[in-house]
């Protein structure tokens, strides 16, 4: 039997031998088409090449592209499991020509590959062409030898392909396989075409026109080729099956489900096994490409796929998490062709297990409540919309599950009633938001969130993508456009820009389109999870509804990632060095530095800081993978995860692990964090602590840098050490000892100077004492004597005088400092506070204070020191 892996390899090898570039599958989240939920065909990754917006170094390509159809226009979800060929996930094999070969070569390639390399019987094949495409019909006769009866002309758009209402388009030719007369159905174009006898296996699109808004077709100067062959359908043919679910890959997954559940693969549970097998593939590949379950956008579609599979697992009688146990079987089947499955297997397993555990509780409760409500209804009565809304809003039971359960019972739902209840809830929420004080100024964001929904963040997996401008704010109000020079706030339907949160600053970058450039200077979250891009229109005009290419500043994001990841390592290193009392109290992760505040009652010593720095750099040198998993907060904490200060956590959290564990836990650092991080610890480069300081009682701040900035800091320190060594005329190793010796010498000299100043200040004796109104006064301008020494000097002079008044002024540092001392026997008549205040006025000061016998004051004007002494004399004489 030819396996699916063999078919894929044979297809790719054929076109590689015919000078086609082998292009790996693009991620399921489209980077070049914001209108798509997921990549749903093989040509999507090449869309911009076909339109001329992107140039690649090749003109021929072949690929095996992952595809998902589970939302929006192309939604096969509800049919999966009940038909032979509907899937949410499938593989599209394709070959493409970008202005190189055209119809003749495309038809030759297809016919040769099918009949020679794959060995299909020629009499089992027939084709369709667009009714007016005589060229294609003629080539099929010439190349394949098909008779006119086996070249069916189709007049409908089934055989005319369009990329959009305006743009490249052209006729197509579909290749069908005849399974034989024992199966009901007729050829395409016949009344019986919906039967299963004739199955389309390959579609060749001849992209030869440009269609304008008036529906006028203009020949393209370089016509192109886009083909697509569904691997699952073709595998059924090559393996002698009529049902895609009987092919090797899907059958292996079905049997894994059978063995895990101990049920019959083809009995009453046949549909459930098929749903689980299909949805397992879709779930695993979507998670591997960076999407996690949520209540918005792609995350919601993923959750819906998962829950549909989980409901079928429930039908199998499984009451404990079950589907996650099937992931290894999928990895064995497809992991070689798609290595991302192997890399993401732990994340896929954890995510499925978490969702299944939550879903089991919700499903049991929801179905019980739903049964109670249905039991009260008449046989044919629909379920009230208000009841469905209560199940959704109060108990978390999704509407689609309610509709699914009702459908099985032959009941309907009052959808208008549900929508009405939802609208009432939004009105209440709007009123609550508008009345929340300062938040009232942000009402515009709540209204936009209600209108547009949450932003789809793509930044964990990519730093650039196409996006649609869904909201535009100019001067605080919604606008339809903004021109060159205007400041704008832009909302995109999907974005690679990280919005500031959890200490990580918002991304910057550009939004580009033809003739347009918007410089994004910040990204912020509003109304919970609405990403708002702030910037300025550099050139052109940005309009609401426009498609733009969003690109994050790569170097800046890389530096932020490094600092954020280093913060996690720093946190754990501090805990190990100082104790488990160390917890985060705030952080900043910016492109040029990190700042980390922790609970710590005393300063961190130099030796401790160096130990912490060494520990972080040791983890960096390990170059171990940085892993992200999804789990409940409780489960994360059980696994040793640290919750970060200031973060708000929901039912699910991203758990970031980095560094090699020591046996007590699986990794060196395990934290709950929604930020962006490096792929491996080695990507941080290096780590250097710059400073440690206190910011509040019991809180210390660490400032540090990583990567090139860390190396620059090390170089700067080395340069300073070299300069110090040169100045001291000593080798660098002796600099610390020399500095200590110099400081000791300075202290000794300062003591000597102080003693000399004291002797000079007190040694003038009676010559320095004058008589003012019968009171002995020693009034002296001591110049640069330290202000702190004035009181002790005043005491010494008073003692030598026996009685009287002392007034001393220091002019150190350009300011006047004044001390007045009065002997105890004179304080009743002459108060030191009164005298010092008089002196302070002369030097521009105000007030002064102390005791009646000793007071001090000061002023900014040291040039008036003598005037201050004169003021004391005048006060004594008054």
Image: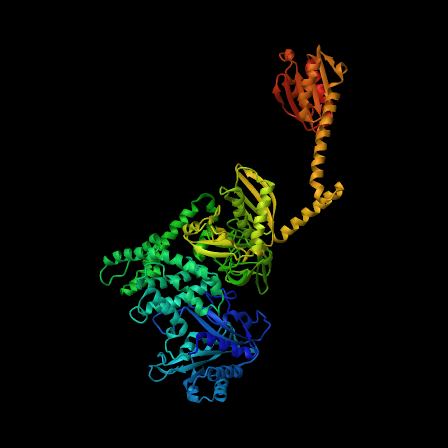
Note whether 146 is above or below 239 in the view shown: below
Left or right of 480 in this view: 799? right
Provide residue 717's location: percent of width, then percent of height.
Answer: 67, 46
Note whether 652 is above or below 258 in the view shown: above
Closer to us: 277 or 648: 277
The N terminus lies in quadrant? bottom left
- The answer to whether any part of residue 557 appears in the image is no
Closer to us: 584 or 38: 584
Note whether 793 is above or below 619 in the view shown: above
Note whether 826 is above or below 172 in the view shown: above
Provide residue 154's location: percent of width, then percent of height.
Answer: 43, 82
| Residue located farthest toward the front when viewing the structure as drawn | 663
Closer to us: 453 or 305: 305
The picture quadrant where one finds residue 488 is bottom right
Q: Could you tell me which residue is drawn at 62 percent across and 12 percent down? A: 828
| Residue located farthest toward the top when viewing the structure as drawn | 774
The C terminus lies in quadrant? top right
Left or right of 833 in this view: 74? left
Provide residue 585's location: percent of width, then percent of height.
Answer: 51, 43
Scheme of image coloration: rainbow
Closer to us: 663 or 586: 663
The number of callouts visible is: 0
- The answer to whether any part of residue 746 appears in the image is yes
Provide residue 798's location: percent of width, then percent of height.
Answer: 69, 15
């Amino acid at each position: 039997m030819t396996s699916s892996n063999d078919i894929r390899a044979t297809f790719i090898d054929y076109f590689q031998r015919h000078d086609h570039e082998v292009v790996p599958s693009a991620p399921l989240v489209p980077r070049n088409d914001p209108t798509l939920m997921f990549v749903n065909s093989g040509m999507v990754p090449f869309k911009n090449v076909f339109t001329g917006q992107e140039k690649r170094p090749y003109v021929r390509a072949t690929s095996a592209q992952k595809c998902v159809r589970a939302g929006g226009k192309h939604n096969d979800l509800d049919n999966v499991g009940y038909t032979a060929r509907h899937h949410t996930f499938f593989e599209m094999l394709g070959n493409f020509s970008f202005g190189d070969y055209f119809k003749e070569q495309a038809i030759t390639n297809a016919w040769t590959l099918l009949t020679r390399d794959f060995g299909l019987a020629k009499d089992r094949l027939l084709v369709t062409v667009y009714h007016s495409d005589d060229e294609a019909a003629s080539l099929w006769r010439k190349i394949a030898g098909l008779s006119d009866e086996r070249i069916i002309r189709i007049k409908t758009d089934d055989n005319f392909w369009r990329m959009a209402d305006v743009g490249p388009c052209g006729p197509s030719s579909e290749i069908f396989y005849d399974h034989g007369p024992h199966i009901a159905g007729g050829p395409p174009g016949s009344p019986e075409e919906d039967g299963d006898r004739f199955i389309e296996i390959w579609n060749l699109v001849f992209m030869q026109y440009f269609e304008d808004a008036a529906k006028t077709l203009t020949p393209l100067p370089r016509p192109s080729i886009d083909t697509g062959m569904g691997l699952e359908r073709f595998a059924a043919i090559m393996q002698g099956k009529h049902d895609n679910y009987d092919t090797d890959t899907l059958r292996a997954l079905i049997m894994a489900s059978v063995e895990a559940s101990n049920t019959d693969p083809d009995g009453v549970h046949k549909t459930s096994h098929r749903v689980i097998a299909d949805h397992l593939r879709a779930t695993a590949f979507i998670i591997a490409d960076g999407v996690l379950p949520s209540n918005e956008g792609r995350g919601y579609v993923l959750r819906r796929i998962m829950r549909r599979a989980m409901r079928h697992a429930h039908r199998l009688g499984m009451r404990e998490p079950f589907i996650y146990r099937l992931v290894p079987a999928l990895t064995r089947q497809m992991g070689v062709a798609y290595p991302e499955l192997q890399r993401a297997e732990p994340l896929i397993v954890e995510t499925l297990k978490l969702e299944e555990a939550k879903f089991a509780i919700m499903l049991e409760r929801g179905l019980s409540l739903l049964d109670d409500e249905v039991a009260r209804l008449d046989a044919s009565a629909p379920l009230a919309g208000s009841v469905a809304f209560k199940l959704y809003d109060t108990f978390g039971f999704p509407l689609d599950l309610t509709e699914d359960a009702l459908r099985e019972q032959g009941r309907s739902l009052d959808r208008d009633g549900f929508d009405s209840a939802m609208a009432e809830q939004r009105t209440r929420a709007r009123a609550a938001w508008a009345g929340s004080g300062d938040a009232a100024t942000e009402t515009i964001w709540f209204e936009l969130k209600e209108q547009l929904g949450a932003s789809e963040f793509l930044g964990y997996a990519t730093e650039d993508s196409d996006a649609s401008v869904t909201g535009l704010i100019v001067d605080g109000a919604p606008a339809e456009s903004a021109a060159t020079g205007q400041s704008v706030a832009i909302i995109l339907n999907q974005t690679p820009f990280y919005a500031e949160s959890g200490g990580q600053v918002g991304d910057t970058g550009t939004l580009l389109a033809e003739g347009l450039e918007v410089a994004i200077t910040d990204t912020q979250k509003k109304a919970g999870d609405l990403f708002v891009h702030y910037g300025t229109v550099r050139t052109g005009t940005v309009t609401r509804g426009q498609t733009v290419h969003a690109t994050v500043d790569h170097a800046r994001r890389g530096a932020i990632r490094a600092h954020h990841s280093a913060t996690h390592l720093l946190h754990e290193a501090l805990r190990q060095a100082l104790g488990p009392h160390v917890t985060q109290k705030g952080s900043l992760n910016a492109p040029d530095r990190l700042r980390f505040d922790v609970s710590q009652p005393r300063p961190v010593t130099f030796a401790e800081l160096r130990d912490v720095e060494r520990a972080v750099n040791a983890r960096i040198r390990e170059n171990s993978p940085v892993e992200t998993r999804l789990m409940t907060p409780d489960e994360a904490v059980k696994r040793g995860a640290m919750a970060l200060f200031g973060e708000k956590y929901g039912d699910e959290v991203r758990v970031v692990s980095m560094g090699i564990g020591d046996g007590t836990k699986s990794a060196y650092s395990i934290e709950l964090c929604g930020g962006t991080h490096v792929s491996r610890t080695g990507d941080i480069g290096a780590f250097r602590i710059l400073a440690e300081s206190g910011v509040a009682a019991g809180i210390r701040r660490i400032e540090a840098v990583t990567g090139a900035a860390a190396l620059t800091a090390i170089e700067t320190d080395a340069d300073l050490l070299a300069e110090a060594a040169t100045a001291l005329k000593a080798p660098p190793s002796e600099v610390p000892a020399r500095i200590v010796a110099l400081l000791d010498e300075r202290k000794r000299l300062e003591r000597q100077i102080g003693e000399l100043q004291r002797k000079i200040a007190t040694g003038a004796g009676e010559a320095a004492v004058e008589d003012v109104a019968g009171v002995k006064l020693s009034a002296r301008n001591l110049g640069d004597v330290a202000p702190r020494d004035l009181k002790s000097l005043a005491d010494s002079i008073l003692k030598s005088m026996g009685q009287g008044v002392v007034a001393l002024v220091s002019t150190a540092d350009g300011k006047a400092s004044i001390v007045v001392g009065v002997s105890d026997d004179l304080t009743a008549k002459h108060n030191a506070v009164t005298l010092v205040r008089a002196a302070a006025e002369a030097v521009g000061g105000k007030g002064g204070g102390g005791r009646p016998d000793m007071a001090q004051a000061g002023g900014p004007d040291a040039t008036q020191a003598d005037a201050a002494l004169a003021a004391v004399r005048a006060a004594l004489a008054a």
